[in-house]
Amino acid sequence: MTTDLTAIAGLLSRFTGPDLTQTLGRIEATVRGVTGSECEDFLLNAGAGRDVLSAAAEMKRLAGQINVTIHALGILLCLPHILAPGERVEYVSLGAGNTGRQFDLETNLRVAEFKFIRWRGGPESIRQNSIFKDFLLLAEYPTAKRKNLYLLGTSHALRFLRGGRALSSVLSRNDKLLKMFIKRFGDDFQTVRDYYSVHADSVQIEDVSPWLSELEEDLIGETASE
């Protein structure tokens, strides 16, 4: 399959038309009564070829790379705003996940995680789980360095951290983290608020929006490092 974006976009556009919902509705209506022997002509007329499927698959693959690229560029472009005089980068983890490193960034003065996701404030349990994981791992990391969690907007995240969602729910999809939490705290904390109220001063949560105006719109879904 070609990686020529113009060719990929052209193939997809010929199938989707200007409005995919209307296109699919038209196909749903016209496919009624089609027989096996008529399928080939029907698919040809609908523009539903294997080349289009291949183009869609390639676009999905490229979209995954875009998420990783945005995460990497976001971290790098934050560095001039983050680094204090005399502060030196010890490592950054720019790829998918932390690639064997503890955090997205460590300097001689701080450790940090980044999330370039703009929350809409609805039921965003997956994002909440990811934010709590980052906050927890930073808060519990044994270091005298500063700990920072950098977000694209902080209001929804702080509302979640100060809220009453059950920790059993937040940690339910991460067995390793759940076991660590239970081993360390037992049943001392029942809700996110319980834990955050004790550890809020351990991690500084900061909004990167003023530094990354290009991400003011919700350009990406779940980021690579989640």
Image (cartoon, rainbow, N blue to C red):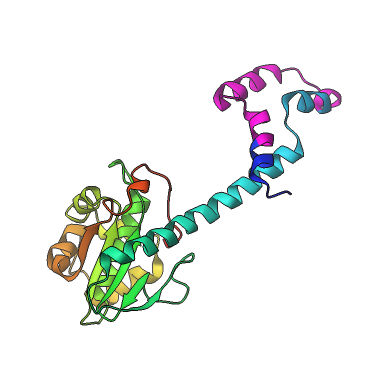
Report the residue at 21% width, 61% height from top.
205
Residue 52 vs residue 123: left or right? right
Horizontal side of residue 51 vs 188, given as left or right? right
Camera sees residue 191 = no
Q: Position of residue 166 (x, y in %)?
A: 24, 56
- Image position of 55 (left or right of 107): right
- Number of callouts in the render? 0
**In this view, 109 is above or below 206:** below
Is residue 40 covered in magenta? no
Task: Tell me which segment is drawn in magenta.
Answer: 10-39
* Residue 202 vs residue 88, the one in the foreground: 88
Name the side, left or right, on which 33 lies relative to 78: right
Q: Which residue is more in the foreground, 129 or 212?
A: 212
Residue 129: x and y, percent?
Answer: 33, 57
Determine which quarter of the picture holds residue 141: bottom left
Seen at 83% across and 28% down, the residue is 40
Judging depth in this view, the residue of 3 and 221 nearest the camera is 3
